[in-house]
């Protein structure tokens, strides 16, 4: 075969997540390997490459730009064109020109890669058991960045000067640690310390701090552990006394604790894992995955009382790898805070707050720039359903189906707050801020927004906010307006849920929405939450809703689900008498006077707004069945009620659909009569729960189909916090798909209020563009 010695040159444009992920050094190494000359550079769109060499080598080079891209890169397209060869002989990385707006300067924190893990376990390696090793393909990013450009001085590694060995790696384009900003080793990098509660360092012989910490755990102690995005509290998961003590000291009444397991094999001793769950568990985002617990799972009762699932995660930093493998078994790894407070991340604050809970503190001297909670996810219908999107996912962009003609900020809702910044056709959702109910969380929102505006070089000119006048997120928006330079646009809460779900699927057309949640401010000033919408991005129509009842005592009815039951039983008084219904035995412990007082609130309406909330209906039915009369967190009764449902087919309870008015009404009263009859007949709660879920899914599907037919629409949207309920979501999707409609469910963002800000941005972008 004659050898082709002619030279070709191409210019290739690489699109996708290709900046800040080691892509240019990868191209450089590839060019060296294949004998290619030319250059690679970052520009505003992504990466631009010119490559010159033998034709076969150039072809291989172009193919591998996509096929062999480094782990953190996500190449969505490579477009190459032939250009004239210029006789270049070297390949170089051309430095970025500053001044252009950065489009992807910071990526999410990523779990330790396999190459780094091998070094961690190798006694001959200079980073053997070094808890902060990382490389271009893994390690901290978002949690350590303090500003832009994303470069070592703009991270919390700024104070650590690299030793000669680390600097040489950092400077060598052929090294895995080329420009790895958090690069460190035992000589020059951060260190761990084991501290007593009083702050003194624990001394020990010949053992490192992590081994000593693991010994403490094995001895039944509770440790505060400084991790990536904040502090955790840790103890052995199978130690009844330690877990009980942790629960008592943390005052976290019933919420399940997350567990850290060393590997998938250890996870399988605790839960049943399907392929989708295993994939999430081992993904580089490393979320907490909720999976069905095995009946004989060796964990203390106090880990997750009454919960059918356990929340598991695999280690995502070298420190966590070492700790869990040294401890030899699953560890409770729950956020370092008292119940309802934000997770601690500042060392001084953590020392003060956590010393009362932990026996000792495993700390280190690399500061955390942004508090970032663990993400939480479960699998429904083989797809991920995010319950909290934070560490590992933030700040990866979520695409918008409509281009923002000017930068937009969405300030989110009140609970599970996260904000969102949109620019061009991308949106950046923030880390989980938490429930905005005091000055501290408002400050977290304010500083978080400032941080994102700096990181992405964006100055919002339009701010989208919830319509609720009392939300601190709305208050923040109005303050920005007063300061000048921005316009506001209000977005109704359930419209934001609907729009977020449409937008993440790239859909802009009208669809039928069934949006079920606990609370959202309605256009009529009442509390909405069981809503049927016909909506696109710009606007919405409320075409149906759950029959409204009063919330006796307002928010107290959220903490005391029996009040919602009292509300239904009071308004149905005559009907129940006629049906011969019996008063549920579950309410016998409630004093007659208390019941009458709440019943009077229902009839008189004092301080008791109307609500069409689906979440409150679930609460009411759960309370009637005696699941919970009072709860320690919103939705607890409904979650436990779902857990009780007997798997398999159940005869659905009847619901009535009233179509006499233009706005149709989902009337649950026939269901309540049937539930009371079943309770009187001693039907097990497992059956009642199954019948309730089946009935609610069935009537939801029936209404969605009815609306779709009348409005001539072919797409349905299901969202809102109530759809965190796996059983309900599963049954409802199946029922609607059975009628041939396409069903959209949140996948990249949570169905709860964690998606609101993104929905607000999508709505604002659509309105602004009209
Ligand atoms: Zn690595
Ligand atoms: Zn070093």
Image: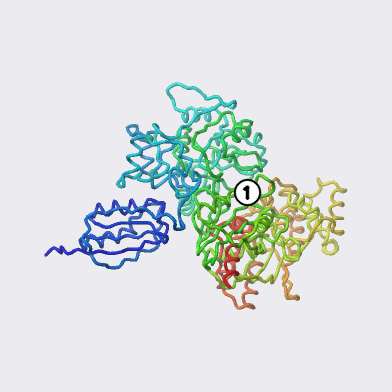
Q: Is residue 680 above or below residue 506?
A: above
Colouring rule applied to residues = rainbow
Residue 248 seen from this side: yes
Q: In this rendering, is residue 42 above or below 309?
A: below
Name the image quarter holding the N terminus: bottom left
Q: Residue furthest left?
A: 2
Where residue 328 sits in the image (x, y, percent)?
Answer: 47, 34
Quarter of the picture holding the C terminus: bottom right
Q: Could you say where residue 662 lies in the image, as x and y percent from the top left?
A: 73, 76
Q: Residue at x 59, y 37 (%)?
A: 300
Look at the picture and state if 611 lies above or below 391: below
485, 457: nearer the viewer: 485
Q: Quadrant of residue 132?
A: top left
User: Assess mark 1: CB under 8 A from ligand 1?
Assistant: no
Q: Position of residue 690 (x, y in %)?
A: 65, 58
Instruction: Please say whether residue 691 is visible from this viewpoint.
Output: no
Camera-side residue of 569 and 756: 756
Q: Residue at x 42, y 60 (%)?
A: 44
Q: Is residue 612 left or right of residue 455?
A: right
Q: Secondary structure at mark 1?
A: loop
Which picture quadrant has residue 199?
Answer: top right
- Is 446 or 320 nearer to us in this picture? 446
- The residue pinned by badge 1 equals 434
Q: Nearer the viewer, residue 650 or 290?
A: 290
Q: Quarter for ligand 2?
A: top left
């Amino acid at each position: 075969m004659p050898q082709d010695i002619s030279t070709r040159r191409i210019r290739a444009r690489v699109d996708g997540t290709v900046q800040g992920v080691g892509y240019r050094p990868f191209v450089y190494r590839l060019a060296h390997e294949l004998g290619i000359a030319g250059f690679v550079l970052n520009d505003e769109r992504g990466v631009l490459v010119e490559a010159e060499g033998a034709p076969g080598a150039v072809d291989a080079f172009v193919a591998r730009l996509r096929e062999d891209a480094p782990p953190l890169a996500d190449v969505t397209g490579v477009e190459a064109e032939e250009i004239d060869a210029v006789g270049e002989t070297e390949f170089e990385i051309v430095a970025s020109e500053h001044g252009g707006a950065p489009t992807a300067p910071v990526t999410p924190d990523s779990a330790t890669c396999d190459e780094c893990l091998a070094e961690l376990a190798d006694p001959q390696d200079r980073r053997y058991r070094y808890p902060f090793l990382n490389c271009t393909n893994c390690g901290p990013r978002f949690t350590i960045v303090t500003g832009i450009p994303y470069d070592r001085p703009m991270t919390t590694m700024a104070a650590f000067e690299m030793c000669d060995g680390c600097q040489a790696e950092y400077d060598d384009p052929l090294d895995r640690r080329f420009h790895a900003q958090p690069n460190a080793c035992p000589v020059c990098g951060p260190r761990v310390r084991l501290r007593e509660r009083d702050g003194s360092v624990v001394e020990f012989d010949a053992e490192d701090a992590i081994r000593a910490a693991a010994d403490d755990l094995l001895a039944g102690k509770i440790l505060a552990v400084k991790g990536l995005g904040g502090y955790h509290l840790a103890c052995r998961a199978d130690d009844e006394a330690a877990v009980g003590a942790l629960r008592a000291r943390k005052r976290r009444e019933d919420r399940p604790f997350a567990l850290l397991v060393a590997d998938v094999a250890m996870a399988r001793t605790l839960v049943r894992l399907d392929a989708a769950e295993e994939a999430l568990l081992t993904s580089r985002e490393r979320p907490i995955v909720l999976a069905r617990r095995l009946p004989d799972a060796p964990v203390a009762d106090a880990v997750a009382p009454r919960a059918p699932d356990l929340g598991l995660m695999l280690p995502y930093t070298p420190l966590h790898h070492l700790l869990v493998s040294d401890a030899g078994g699953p560890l409770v790894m729950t956020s370092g805070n008292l119940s309802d407070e934000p997770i601690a991340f500042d060392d001084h604050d953590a020392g003060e707050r956590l010393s009362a809970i932990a026996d000792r503190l495993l700390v280190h001297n690399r500061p955390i720039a942004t508090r970032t909670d663990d993400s939480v996810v479960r699998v429904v219908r083989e797809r991920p359903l995010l319950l909290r999107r934070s560490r590992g996912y933030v700040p990866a962009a979520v695409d918008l189906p409509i281009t923002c003609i000017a930068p937009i900020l969405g300030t989110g809702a009140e609970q599970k707050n996260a904000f969102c910044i949109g620019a061009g056709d991308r949106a950046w959702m923030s880390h989980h801020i938490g429930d905005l109910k005091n000055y501290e969380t408002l400050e977290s929102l304010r500083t978080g927004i400032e941080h994102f505006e700096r990181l992405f070089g964006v100055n919002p000119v339009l701010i989208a906010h919830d319509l609720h006048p009392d939300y601190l997120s709305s208050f923040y928006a109005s303050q920005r307006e007063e300061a000048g330079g921005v316009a506001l646009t209000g977005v109704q809460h359930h419209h934001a849920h609907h729009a977020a779900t449409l937008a993440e699927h790239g859909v802009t057309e009208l669809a039928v929405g069934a949006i079920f949640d606990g609370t959202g401010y309605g256009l009529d000033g009442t509390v909405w939450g069981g809503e049927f919408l016909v909506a696109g991005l710009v606007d919405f129509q409320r075409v149906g809703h759950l029959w409204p009842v009063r919330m006796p005592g307002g928010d107290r009815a959220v903490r005391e689900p029996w009040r919602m039951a009292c509300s239904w039983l009071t308004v149905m008084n005559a009907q129940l008498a006629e049906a011969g219904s019996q008063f549920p035995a579950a309410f016998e412990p409630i004093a007659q006077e208390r019941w009458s007082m709440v019943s009077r609130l229902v009839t008189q309406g004092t301080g008791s707004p109307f609500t069409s909330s689906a979440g409150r209906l679930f609460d009411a039915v759960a309370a009637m069945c005696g699941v919970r009369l009072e709860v320690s967190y919103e939705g607890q009764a409904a979650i436990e009620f779902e857990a009780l449902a007997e798997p398999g087919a159940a005869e659905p309870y009847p619901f009535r659909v009233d179509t006499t008015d233009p706005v149709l009404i989902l009337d649950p009263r026939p269901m309540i009569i049937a539930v009371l009859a079943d309770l009187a007949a001693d039907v097990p709660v497992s059956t009642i729960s199954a019948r309730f879920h089946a009935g609610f899914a069935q009537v939801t599907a029936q209404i969605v189909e009815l609306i779709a037919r009348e409005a001539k629409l072919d797409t349905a949207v299901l969202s809102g916090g109530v759809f965190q309920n796996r059983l309900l979501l599963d049954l409802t999707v199946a029922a609607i798909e059975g009628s041939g409609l396409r069903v959209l469910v949140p996948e990249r963002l949570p169905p709860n209020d964690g998606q609101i800000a993104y929905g607000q941005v999508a709505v604002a972008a659509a309105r602004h563009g009209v």
